[in-house]
Image (cartoon, helix red, strand yellow):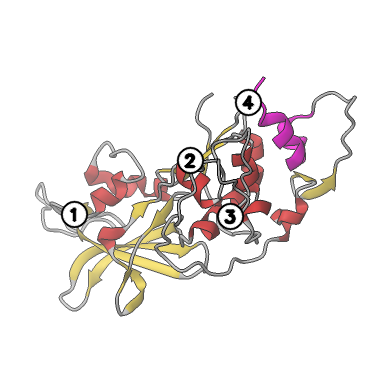
Amino acid sequence: MPAMYCCLVNGMTAVSTDPANSLVRRLLVRGNRLAIEQGRLHLDAASGKPVADWLAAHHKQLVAEILQRTGIDALHYTGYSCGHYPPKKRAGVTLQFDSLLTNANRYAIFNADLTRTKGYKAGSPLPKKQFRLNEGSSFKPFWLSALDAPRRWSALHDYMGKLKGILFDAELTPGKPDRLVATSIRAINLTHQQLLQAFEVSTIPDNCQTASGQTPDNCQTIMPDKIIAPPHVPQGLQPDPATDVDSYGNTVKGNAVSRVDVNPLSPPMKPIEQTTNDWLADYSTTE
């Protein structure tokens, strides 16, 4: 089936710290493929059926569980500004980010040229929020970790909105807790295999228990002694009752939340109308 992606929006949801109770693990155990590729969450149903509607309704919870389990404090781009910065008043472009686990504001400064370089106006200031990258700028590797190259790097300011909705990771500058090391910012990539390891899911379903601590001696699993090393210390998430684990039996239409009584004799429901358990049973099984 075609790859289905979703972009993260502001706001997280409370999740269970027990991987056995997580929605991510339940998807993985049933053979669905999950990964984060170039900063975007990717889901392929084991049945090959479309997942866009269901994924749109649950992507915040899925991402929250993945970030908490792996210890990655992902960053979400919110905007940029241009200016001259002390102590030498060098020109640059500042990118603003929000931390998805802590809600802290972060920023990074990239060297840039804020003047025209061609024509009779060469040397004059560019219009507000326009910039040109210097030769060898670290902005290009950052951009290419998540997106294709723009048609013209000189018009990069026209494409900055494409950074929104992408999950980034970065190092903090020592002594400056809010400033990111510009050269370290990259889109997050977590393979399906890494998520299987992080959520303690075995790849041998027939004669092997997959719960942590229950794997028999004669069954090999993919779970190593250590799961993914967290680059940041995981911190508490902001509660979001609308997407809490306790609401697995609910369906969402607009802003309304309601329970659904499932009648086995009724016609199949659309994915967006199903509860999580209904969807898992229907969409995670190959025909």
Q: Tell me which segment is drawn in magenta.
A: 269-287
Image mark for residue 282: none
Which one is earlier in the sequence, the residue at label 2 or at label 4? 4
Q: CA distance from mark 1 to mark 4?
A: 45 Å
**Which marked residue is nearer to the observer: mark 1 or mark 3?**
3
Mark 1 or mark 3: name the one nearer the start of the chain: 3
Q: What residue is shown with label 3? A: 65
The location of residue 234, given as percent across then percent down, is: 50, 67
Label 2, on which residue? 192
Image: 40 above or below 30: below
Between discs 1 and 4, the one toward the N terminus = 4
Using the image, tell me which numbered label, if any, was put on residue 47: 4
Q: Residue at x 68, y 61 (%)?
A: 240
Residue at (80, 49) in percent of width and height: 257
- Using the numbered discs, state the Cα–Cα distance from disc 1 to disc 2 in whole angstroms: 32 Å
Q: Is residue 251 above or below residue 48?
A: below
Q: Name which residue type carries label 4.
A: Ser
Residue type for callout 3: Glu
**Label 3 crowding class (10 Å Cα cut-off): few <14, some 14-19, many 20+?**
many
* Viewer-side label of 3, 2: 2
Q: Which residue is mark 1?
A: 137
Between 150 and 265, which is closer to the camera in this rendering? 265
Nearer the observer: mark 1 or 4; the answer is 4
Amino acid marked by disc 1? Ser
How far from the left and from the top, in percent, is residue 70?
A: 49, 57
Q: Does residue 116 appear left or right of residue 73 in this picture? A: left
Q: CA distance from mark 1 to mark 3?
A: 34 Å
149 in the magenta segment: no
